[in-house]
């Protein structure tokens, strides 16, 4: 993963959907996902409109970690309609995408379906102008979901780190969606297909807007189930045998023996990452998780 690439590959969704060109495009997809971890997805047919997918509210008879999901709060019905149309379209593209990822490994198309969760999330992000060299978002890997699907405007600023330590510009391509591996997919592949580090450099003279969509992972996914699934999946991934052997024993940041399931691990990450919110709404859990070290 994150080889010394100098550009970000382009994957054409319409070619994946066409039986005549599907095989060739699956090869492009396989290289993009498993050697780089970032790609442009074009010809999606989705309108790029300027919250999460629909989800019921939490109830007392459900596990405490299920509280991480719930209904969106919309400022008005117009925004609600806009967001729901966007998340519905993006969810469908996401479902198609993970099936093509499975097929590019010669796995059954529905291999990753059972890992998909209920509530995917989206953000409307605004980066105001700042002094040259200012940080928009620091270097990181996406910790939520299987894949992140990003709609960005024409301003630019997104950069991807390659293995040589160079930052590669993810220059905006009109009509495309930038896709990157998130840590949920990293966990499913035993760390073999790791997320790619990226950052955003703040604009200097104009405002930048972007809309990331984080594809949900099933919250009740448990470590033992993950270990069983990982073996068959990793065997198909185009990396060295040595890396495959190490993958089975490498714990994911997202699922640790300390936590009952992925949902609890994700809630823990949110509480620790946002301490003021955690202390206010989850005081007992904040105290508990603050004292725990990641296994």
Image (cartoon, rainbow, N blue to C red):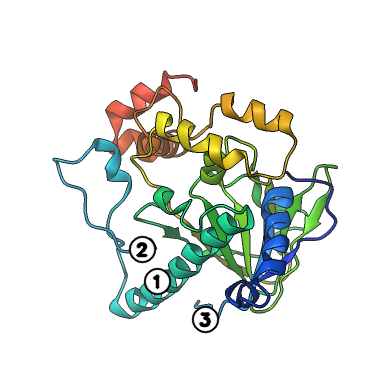
Please report the residue visible at 34 percent of the width from the left and 55 percent of the height from the top.
118
Q: Position of residue 146 (x, y in %)?
A: 51, 50
| Residue 201 visible to an observer of this rendering | no
Residue at the image position 68 percent from the left and 45 percent from the top: 197
Q: SS for tag 1?
A: helix
Name the residue carrying label 3. 47
Query: Which is nearer the N-term, disc 3 or disc 2?
Result: 3
The residue tagged 2 is: 53
Badge 3 crowding class, 10 Å Cα cut-off, few under 14, some 14 to 19, many 20 or more, is few
Confirm or deny contact between disc 3 and disc 2 (CB under 8 A).
Answer: no
Neighbor class of circle 1 (other Cα within 10 Å; few <14, some 14-19, many 20+) is: some
Q: Vertical placement of 218 versus 257: above or below?
A: below
Residue located beneath label 1 in the image:
88
Contact between labelled residues 1 and 2, with CB atoms less than 8 Å apart: yes
Q: Is residue 229 visible?
A: yes
On the rendered image, what quadrant is the N terminus found in? Answer: top right
Disc marking residue 100? none
The alpha-carbon separation of the residues under discs 2 and 1 comes to 7 Å
Q: Is residue 181 left or right of residue 86?
A: right
Q: Earlier in the sequence, mark 2 or mark 1?
A: 2
Q: Is residue 206 left or right of residue 282?
A: right
Q: Is residue 25 above or below residue 164?
A: below
Residue 181 left/right relative to 85: right
* Residue drawn at x 38%, y 61% as measured from the top left: 52
Indicate the secondary structure of the residue bearing disc 3.
loop
**Residue 132 x/y as whole percent:** 78, 58
Which structural element holds mark 2?
loop
Considering depth in this image, is 36 or 205 the residue closer to the camera? 36
Marks 1 and 3, how far apart in space?
11 Å
The tag earlier along the polypeptide, 1 or 3, is 3
Q: Nearer the viewer, residue 291 or 13?
A: 13
């Amino acid at each position: 993963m994150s080889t010394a690439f100098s550009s970000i590959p382009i994957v054409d969704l319409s070619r994946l959907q066409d039986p005549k060109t599907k095989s060739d495009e699956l090869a492009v997809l396989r290289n993009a996902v498993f050697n780089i971890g970032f790609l442009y997805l074009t010809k999606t047919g989705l309108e790029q409109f300027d919250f999460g997918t629909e989800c019921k509210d939490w109830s007392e008879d459900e596990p405490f970690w299920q509280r991480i999901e719930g209904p969106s709060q919309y400022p008005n019905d117009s925004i609600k309609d806009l967001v729901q149309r966007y998340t519905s379209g993006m969810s469908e593209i996401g479902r198609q995408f993970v099936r093509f990822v499975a097929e590019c490994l010669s796995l059954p198309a529905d291999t990753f379906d059972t890992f998909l969760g209920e509530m995917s999330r989206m953000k409307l992000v605004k980066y105001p102008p700042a002094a040259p060299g200012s940080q928009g978002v620091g270097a990181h890997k996406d910790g939520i979901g299987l894949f992140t699907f990003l709609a960005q405007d024409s301003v630019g600023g997104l950069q991807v780190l390659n293995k040589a330590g160079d930052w590669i510009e993810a220059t905006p391509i009109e009509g495309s969606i930038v896709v990157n591996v998130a840590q949920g997919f990293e966990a499913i592949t035993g760390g073999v297909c790791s997320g790619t580090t990226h950052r955003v450099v703040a604009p200097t003279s104009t405002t930048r807007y972007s809309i990331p969509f984080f594809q949900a992972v099933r919250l009740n996914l448990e470590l033992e189930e993950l270990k069983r699934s990982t073996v068959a999946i990793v065997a198909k991934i185009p990396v060295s045998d040595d890396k495959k052997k190490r993958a089975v024993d490498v714990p994911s940041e997202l699922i640790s023996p300390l936590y009952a399931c992925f949902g609890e691990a994700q809630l823990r990450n949110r509480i620790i990452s946002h301490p003021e919110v955690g202390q206010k709404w989850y005081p007992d859990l904040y105290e508990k998780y603050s004292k725990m070290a990641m296994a």
